[in-house]
Every structure is written in structure tokens, then in C-alpha cells.
Image: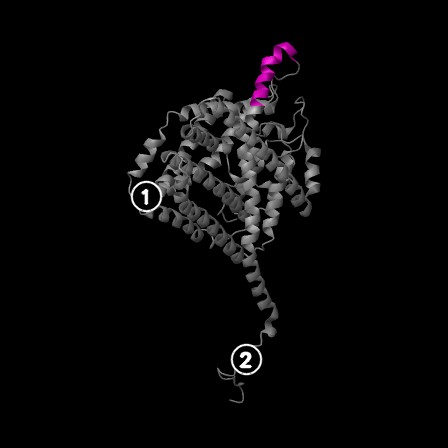
Amino acid sequence: CRQWPCGNTGLTRGYFLEHNEAKYTERRERVYTFLRIPKELEKLMTFGFFLCVDAFLYVFTLLPLRVLLAVLRLLTLPCCGFSGSRLLQPAQVCDVLKGLIMVLCFSMMHYVDYSMIYHQIRGQSVIKLYIIYNMLEVADRLFSSFGQDILDALYWTATEPKERKRDSIGVIPHFFMAVFYVFLHAILIMVQASTLNVAFNSHNKSLLTIMMSNNFVEIKGSVFKKFEKNNLFQMSNSDIKERFTSYVLLLIVCLRNMEQFAWKPDHLWVLFPDVFMVVTSEVAVDFIKHAFITKFNDITADVYSEYRASLAFDLLSSRQKNACTDYSDSVARRMGFIPLPLAVLLIRVVMSSIKVQGALSYTCVFLFYLGLVTLKVLNSIVLLGKSCVYVKRANMEDKLFERPSTTPSSSGKNPNKADQATSRPSTPPPEPEQPAPSLSKEEECEVQGASDLKHRTPKKDLLEIDRFTICGNRID
């Protein structure tokens, strides 16, 4: 017994935690980080949500005006005389293409019966609807992943300089591909809204409970996987897009239900508990998921401020005079949010739910449009101000001002390699801190994809990542 020191009994044993101060200090910091995650995540989510609002309102407010200006340019071209090598500027060509896609898809959506889809879904069993809902979520991610590539291919094919050797199938096939994609994606979102509407109107609310519990299954599929900082950025952007889409779907469901009950205000209070449950479950799942992902992967809460600064950098870059892409397209690449299909569906639902008759009704519609324009402008001003603050805090101003120095010549006479291989609607500059200036953006994406397959560990800057739709759980 003398060789081994005897310990104290259970009643008198003491704790000497100061002997392992570093360990317990680290544990306490993890608790503080866990508690900070919801606040920092919600800051990112709020900023990203209003970015999606800005891109979504652009389709209803500024895009029609830009299409009108492009059409006026075509009509006044014989009077003003032809000067230059293009009838329209590349940005105007893209605007006209977007407008044509919206008009054609909206016309095709008139032949889709929303009531028939609703009753077909209502006649299915709860288990079948649960499977359908999961399949729709997967299909929506796949459509969003490939949809922007289709639109980018159309824009670049339509605006590619004429003196270059063309290796595309032509503008018209690309245009019909884009129309077909937007139409199918709009129908997919309509089926999602119909499924959610059936869940709202079910008597026992079991379907809605099952659909909401499906969100918590997402926690199991993500928190126990390895995540790097870039992968978490992918997931964060995907969550922003999903939250915004969920809010628009809830708006569509409320419009359809209010129409069925003759717009009685009392029915809105009947829908409120279900809407609150959907929103609460989305927010709670995001909080729990991100809190445990950061805990298991030793990621600090300050990383969300870096993500916010990266999104702000995208906004400021797209507002420059020599920006290589439109802001709505930039948001689509960053978050996987494509506003065209959702806008087509919302216009279809609003026009079928609200009847516009008489001069007073058209006056109200015009005033509502002016209100949307005002909201869009104010939202853009606030976002620009916040973006400047976030970029300045992150010390990213140098990157912002370095981009114009690498922009290729816009004359189109001596295009460089980046111009020849890019698939953007205009000639884009290389990404900031690009490791290989001789590679185009598309080639960099291919090299990155090949490196992932070979299990290499790419140390890429957040600004160089733009495929965020379905890669949220990928392990580098």
C-alpha cells in the first residue's frame, strides 16, 4: 500500500481542474461557439434571403423595363442609323431572351390545370405523398444544378462574337432547351406547392407532420459527416435558397386557399398555425444542423462572417460597370437559386387567383408595380450599403478593385483565351486569386471536378466556388 498513493473516498474526493486548464477552457469555448452559431447563422441567412429577394424582384420590376428598352432600340434603329457591329448589346440580348422565355413559359403554363394536379395528389395515400415529396426535393436540386448551365449556354451562344469559330448547335436549339427547362421546373415547383397545399388541407394534419419531420432527417444525414469550410459554405448557400423557396411556396399555398374561401380574412388565421409550424421547423433544423456541424469539425462561428463577406463581394462585383455577369445569374450560380421558373409559377397563380377587371383594378395593379419597383430599389440600396461594410471588414477591397485590371478587351477584335473558352453571356475576367491565369472559368471548374474525383484537397478561396446546389455534403 505504501507503493501506491491511496485516493480519497467518494465523499471527500476533490477536483483540481486547474491542472488541465487548456482542456477545460477549450470545452467552455466550444459551448460558447455552439450558443453563438444560431445568431451568426441567422445573420447570414437574413443577408442571403434579401439577396434572393433582390434577384427575384428583378424579374418583375427591372427586367420588363430592360426588355422594353431593347425593343425600342430595335424599332428606332432604322431612324437612328446602324452603327457598330451589333444590333443589340450583349446584356440587351440576354434581357430579350429572358423576356421571351418568360412569355412562352407563361403561355404554356395556361394549359396546365392546377386544380387537376391538386386533386390527383389529394387522392394519394399519405405514404405515397411522403415519397413524392422527397422525390420532388431531389428533382428540384437536380434541375437547379443543371438549369443555370442551360441558361448560360444560351446567353453565350447568342452573344458570342461573330468572328470566332463557332462550335455550338445554334441559338434556336439552345433557346428551346431553355424554354423546355424553365417550363418543366415551373411544373415541378407547382407540384411541390400542390403537395404542401394538400398537407395544409388534410383533416388530421398527419401528412404535414410527416413532411415537417422529414426536415429533421436532414440532420442525421449531415451532422456526422466531415465538413471543410468550403463545404459548409456550399451547405449554407443551399439552405438560404431552400428557405426562400419555402416562403414562396407558402405564399402560393395561402393565395390558393384564400381564393377558395373568397378572400375571407378569418381563413388567414386558420392557415397561420400551419405556416408557423413550417417556418419554425425550417429555422430549427438549420440551427441544430449548423451548430453540430461546426462543433464536430472544429469550425468557429466567425466563419459565417466570411461567408457573408463573400456574398457581399459578389454583389459589389456585379454592380461594377465592367461586370462580367448579371446579378441574378451570379446569385443563381452561388446559391442554386434560379428565379425564372419560380417567377413564372407565381405569375400564373396570382393571375388565376386575382381577377383584374375595370379601370380601378388596372390602376391598383400599376400602383402595386410601382410599389414593387420601390421595394426593389430600396432593398438594393440597403444591400449595397451592407455589402460595402462587410467587404471592408473582411479586408477584401483590394480583390474588388483588382478585378477590372484583368478584364479582357471588350472590343472583340483580339480575344484572349479566357474569352474563347468561357460560357458566360459577356467576356468575364478570371476569378480573384486565380492560380492559373491561362485557364478559363469553365476549364477551372473541370479541373476542380477532376481533382475532387482524385481525392485531392483543393485549397480554394470562397470566391472561386460557384456550384452550390447539390454539393453540400461532399467530403473533400
Can you see residue 152?
no
Mark toward the viewer: 2 or 1: 1
Q: Is residue 198 above or below residue 84?
A: below
Can you see residue 266?
yes
Residues 356 and 274: in front is 356
Secondary element under disc 2, as helix, strand or loop, is: loop
Residues 43 and 293: in front is 43
Q: Residues within 10 Å of mark 2 (few under 14, many from 20)?
A: few
Q: Which residues are magenta?
A: 66-82
Q: Tell me which secondary structure the magenta stretch mostly adopts.
A: helix
Q: Position of residue 239 (x, y in %)?
A: 50, 45
Q: Residue furthest bottom?
A: 2
Q: Position of residue 301 (x, y in %)?
A: 58, 54
Amino acid type, callout 1? Ser
- The residue that appears at 64% across and 37% down in the rendered structure is 316
> Label 2 vs label 1: CA separation?
59 Å
Q: Is residue 19 above or below residue 443?
A: below
Is disc 2 in contact with disc 1, using a CB cutoff of under 8 Å?
no
Q: Is residue 145 above or below residue 176?
A: below
Quick one: label 2 or label 1, which is nearer the N terminus?
2
Is residue 246 on the magenta stretch?
no
- The residue that appears at 37% across and 27% down in the rendered structure is 112
Secondary element under disc 1, as helix, strand or loop, is: loop
Q: Count the numbered circles shown.
A: 2
Left or right of 316 on screen, residue 220: left
Mark number displayed over residue 202: 1
Q: Position of residue 390 (x, y in %)?
A: 65, 45
Mark number displayed over residue 14: 2
Amino acid type, callout 2? Gly
Q: Residues within 10 Å of mark 1 (few under 14, many from 20)?
A: few
Q: Is residue 271 above or below residue 180?
A: below
- The residue that appears at 28% across and 38% down in the rendered structure is 123
